[in-house]
Amino acid sequence: MILGVMSISSFTALHVIISLVAIVSGVIVVLGMLGSHRLAGLTALFLATTLLTSATGFLFPIKNFTPALAVGVLSLILLLIALIGLYSRRLRGSWRWMYVVTAITALWFNVFVLIVQAFLKVPTLHALAPAGNEPPFLIAQGGALAVFVVLGAIALVKFHPAPPLSA
């Protein structure tokens, strides 16, 4: 039981759904950045679900510090910087590029974990890379990283949204 309320399997399903919502909304947000669009509602959804994904990862019954927990800690730090840059500093000055870098890196962490989990849980993928260090796994992770580096570089150049309207 997680928090005395949910079975581990139900909690895992909820965690996966939150993660997938974070990834899909994050991809849309990054594509919006490429057109210099703020996409306020989707950005809030992306940041909130990514935060939830990272936070709920700590609720699994894990006895030792693992690479997954390290990714969770790093993701929470990145999300804090992204939230400050976007909502407190309103993307002014260097906060614009710090937001872009931290938001895209947090999304990449989610995709990184998705690829790891796919190779662990999908039988066809697991057969290709049972130890998680074989070429198919490394190609998938390297390809994802390359895509995120390119998207991040383009977003750094193109994302200059107009300031939000005052109320």
Image (cartoon, grey):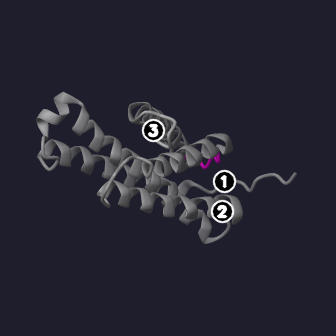
User: Which numbered marker is on residue 91?
Assistant: 2
Comparing 53 with 37, the one in front is: 53
Q: In this view, does 101 lie above or below 2?
A: below
Distance, label 3 to label 1, CA atoms, is: 32 Å
Q: In percent of the image, x 63 and y 63: which residue is there?
A: 85
Comparing 60 with 92, the one in front is: 60
| Circle 3 Cα neighbour tier, 10 Å, few/some/many (<14 / 14–19 / ≥20) | some
Mark 2 residue type:
Leu
Q: Earlier in the sequence, mark 3 or mark 1?
A: 3
Q: Horizontal and vertical percent for residue 17?
A: 47, 33
Distance, label 1 to label 2, CA atoms, is: 9 Å
- Residue lying at the far front of the rendered structure: 4
Q: Are marks 1 and 2 in contact (CB under 8 Å)?
A: yes
| Circle 1 Cα neighbour tier, 10 Å, few/some/many (<14 / 14–19 / ≥20) | some
User: Which numbered marker is on residue 161?
Assistant: 1
Mark 3 residue type:
His
Q: In percent of the image, x 37 and y 57: which residue is there?
A: 69
Q: Horizontal and vertical percent for residue 150?
A: 39, 53
Q: In this view, does 4 lie above or below 109?
A: above
Q: Name the residue under label 3.
A: 15
Q: Horizontal and vertical percent for residue 67?
A: 30, 58
Name the secondary structure under disc 1. Answer: loop
Name the secondary structure under disc 2. Answer: loop
Q: In percent of the image, x 37 and y 45: which residue is there?
A: 111
Left/right of residue 156 with respect to residue 151 in the rendered view: right
Q: Which of marks 3 and 2 is nearer the N terminus?
A: 3
Res. 15 image quadrant: top left
The boundaries of the magenta stretch are 34-38
Comparing 64 with 75, the one in front is: 64
Q: In percent of the image, x 66 and y 53: which residue is there?
A: 161
